Image (cartoon, rainbow, N blue to C red):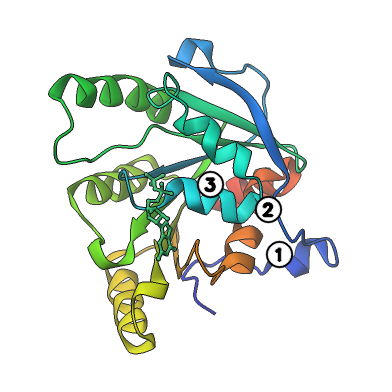
Amino acid sequence: MTGIGEHEPLDNVDAGRRPDRIEARFLTSAPTLRECPSEDLPEVAIVGRSNAGKSSVLNQLTRNRQLARTSKTPGRTQLLNFFETSLGGRLVDLPGYGYARVAKTQKHVWENHVDAYLANREQLAATVLVMDIRHSFEAFDVMMVEWAQQSDLPMHVLLNKADKLKHGAQQDTLRAARKRLVGGLFTVQLFSAQTGLGRDEAIERLTRWLTPILSRASGDEQAG
Ligand code: GDP
């Protein structure tokens, strides 16, 4: 087992129905919180610094190339992009962040819209933080981890591009990440969008959050 959370394995809740991919399709883009879809369905927001591999991760989990391309379409890169899933809940691709050369104004756009979404979105059930395993816990990542802690919101961390490291180095980084991510809110795993390493575990985690009845049960656990 590579997660550090306290949740039961999904099999115990819904045996025999584990999907081998998350069926998802583009729903809509929203420039601001006010324009986000209104239905009360659980949302899982995916965040990561640019180039950490967020689009590739989405691709790998949904097996839908179209989906990740949608978020990279010019004009959509600064928007909150919503994807509906067959599980009921929605995946929300938040704008990428963190190029060294990013303009200050762009940073402000990110902060305003993404901040508002993260701070006020009632449907938000959990977040997924994608990090490049070779450059983990950069300033942006630390900010997101601290935010999750303060907001009491579950966060699943993917140490992506694990294929770039040898087995020993992967395990060392995983251990170090677990040490930093203390508390029941966090789970962390090795992942490779390129090879599919860690796919099943990530799908299991997301399925729990994206399925309304399971997501509510996790929320109750958290509250209690
Ligand atoms: P984004 O900016 O976070 O959406 O990142 P992309 O998904 O566009 O990926 C950035 C670069 O990293 C691309 O060249 C990908 O092919 C590469 N990449 C993404 N995930 C992996 C991975 O797991 N392993 C390797 N080796 N390369 C990856």
Residue at horizontal 62%, vertical 38%?
Answer: 66
* Residue 199 image label: none
Assess mark 2: CB under 8 A from ligand 1? no
Going from the N terminus, do you reach mark 1 or mark 2 first? 1
Please indicate whether residue 116 sits to the left or right of residue 42 in the image: left
* Residue 10 image label: 1
Residue for badge 2:
207
Residue type (three-letter) at the residue carrying disc 1? Leu
Residue for badge 3:
223
Where does residue 188 sit, x and y in percent of width and height? Answer: 43, 65
Q: Label 2 near label 3: C-beta < 8 Å?
A: no
Where residue 202 sits, quadrant-wise, is bottom right
Image quadrant, ligand 1: bottom left
Please indicate whether residue 140 sits to the left or right of residue 125 in the image: left
Q: What is the crowding at mark 2: few (fewer than 14 residues within 10 Å), some, or many (at least 20)? A: many
Going from the N terminus, do you reach mark 3 or mark 2 first? 2
